[in-house]
Image (cartoon, rainbow, N blue to C red):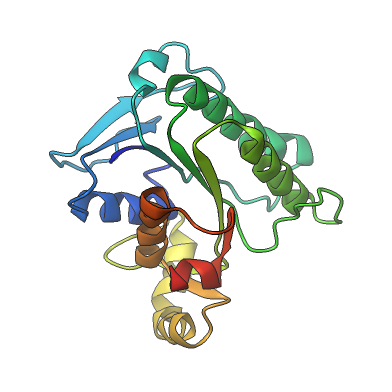
Amino acid sequence: MKVILFGGSGMVGQGVLRECLIDPGVESVLSVGRSPLGVQHPKLREVLHKDFTDYTAIEPQLSGYDACFFCLGVSSIGMDAERYRHLTYDITMAAAKTLVRQSPGMVFTYVTGRGTDSTEQGSLMWARVKGKTENDLLKLPFKAAYMFRPAGIQPLHGVRSKTAWINAVYAVTAPILAITARVAPDYMTTSEKLGRAMISVVRSGYPKPILESADINRF
């Protein structure tokens, strides 16, 4: 399996990258990002790219891949609707439309979140935008596309958020998160399980295109 990873420096992306690098069935990982990950591994190659709405300069390097793990995402807290839509919908669709031209046989996986609004009609701005992003991704002619909607994520194996206060919260609540991940799979998963599930849907598919936390943990 040859994989393209977006968002490898984020908490979700770090977990997915780790699982790809230790999985013997993953041949190579191409990370597309604005800055170096600071990770060295024989499987890993990085392409630095600044404009996430235009991939013309690197498009030929994106062909021949089996999977894309799209882990880029931002919080909607304090952000106006237009900016959030650009960072969530426009950037995701620009990458997906480029990849479907270059690697139409790939499986595209997108990390959204619990509460995403597939109707695009609800009261929460972020949920509507995420819902439209999911819906439009599922219309593209990839081999398959899967939307991952984790609720809480417990970071494992040194995975860290880029936000200091979030790391502090995780450090304090780590024992509670571990228990919740075991006893309430509808509301909590781990960075490890999320990464493993994303790899698994590429290998063997899944009966439905949207995976909630319970699906991720079960798979």
* Residue sitting at x 77%, y 41%: 81
| Image quarter of the N terminus | top left
Taking 151 as reference, is 121 above or below it? above
Taking 209 as reference, is 1 above or below it? above
Q: Is residue 9 left or right of residue 181?
A: left
Name the residue nearer the viewer: 3 or 87.
3
Q: Is residue 21 left or right of residue 89?
A: left
Q: Is residue 82 left or right of residue 144?
A: right
Report x, y in % for residue 216.
48, 66
**Quarter of the view holding residue 107:** top left
Please indicate, yes or no, whether residue 23 appears anywhere in the rendered image. yes
| Image quarter of the C terminus | bottom left
Name the residue nearer the viewer: 87 or 115.
115
**Quarter of the view holding residue 102:** top left
* Residue sitting at x 67%, y 32%: 86
* Residue sitting at x 48%, y 63%: 165
Report x, y in % for residue 64.
33, 25
Taking 212 as reference, is 140 above or below it? above
Name the residue nearer the viewer: 206 or 80.
206
* Residue sitting at x 64%, y 63%: 114
Considering every residue shown, the one lying at the far top of the view is: 57
Report x, y in % for residue 46.
28, 30
